[in-house]
Image: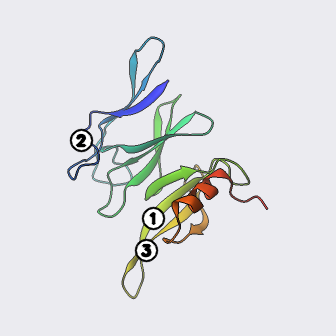
Amino acid sequence: MVYSIQGEASTKDTEDYVGGVQITAQNTISGKPEILLAAVPDDDPKINLDGFTNLKLSLDAKTLYFESSAWATSAAVHALDIASRQASYITDGSLICQVGSGTYQGDLIVQQHRYFVQGGAYDYLYLYDKTGKKLGLVADDNVTKEQVSDLRESLGDS
């Protein structure tokens, strides 16, 4: 199967890109596409299912993680159970990756935009489980791509 976001309102990586309007699965043998989730706009950012971006397949290939349009500074991260086609909200932010092995295998590393009380903002990386429970801070906003790659490979092994 090939999973993709379809129906983009504009070209990806352009200023006016707002994301796709459906998530599809395409059988690589028959070529037949199947809609897994169609857009369901809503004023509540946690419920809004529209403007899909950043599609990622879970390690067990049973769940698709994606982002939808939400707040001015953050997307909403959702999980789509492929078998039941049920979508659920996980948290605000941008899904960076899923941990590949170790104690936290399968958990999600999410970048979240937050504000200091005295002013200013930061974009730290946090670890969430698949249900949306925050497990803790992983890294600050000075983390390099190489360090994120190391976190993705294995987190929590001593």
Residue 122 got which mark? 3
Q: In this view, does 144 lie to the left or right of 120?
A: right
Indicate the secondary structure of the residue bearing disc 3. strand
CA separation, marks 3 and 2? Answer: 29 Å
Q: Which residue lies furthest to the front in this view?
A: 146
CA separation, marks 2 and 1? Answer: 25 Å
Of marks 2 and 1, the one in the foreground = 2
Q: In which quarter of the image is the C terminus?
A: bottom right
> How many residues crowd mark 2 within 10 Å: few (<14), some (14–19), many (20+)?
few
Indicate the secondary structure of the residue bearing disc 1. strand
What amino acid is labelled 1 in the image? Answer: Gln
Q: Do the residues labelled 3 and 1 touch (CB within 8 Å)?
A: no
CA separation, marks 3 and 1? Answer: 8 Å
Rendered view: 150 above or below 53: below
Residue 75 got which mark? none
> How many residues crowd mark 3 within 10 Å: few (<14), some (14–19), many (20+)?
some
Q: Is residue 115 left or right of residue 149?
A: left
> How many residues crowd mark 1 within 10 Å: few (<14), some (14–19), many (20+)?
some
Q: Circle 1 is placed at which residue position?
A: 112
Q: Circle 2 is placed at which residue position?
A: 11
Residue placed at 39% from the left, 88% from the top?
Answer: 118
Of marks 3 and 2, the one in the foreground = 2
The location of residue 150, given as percent across then percent down, is 63, 57
Residue placed at 52% from the left, 64% from the top?
Answer: 144
What amino acid is labelled 2 in the image? Answer: Thr
The location of residue 55, given as percent across then percent down, is 44, 41
Along the polypeptide, which appears first: circle 3 or circle 2?
2
- The image quadrant of residue 135 is bottom right
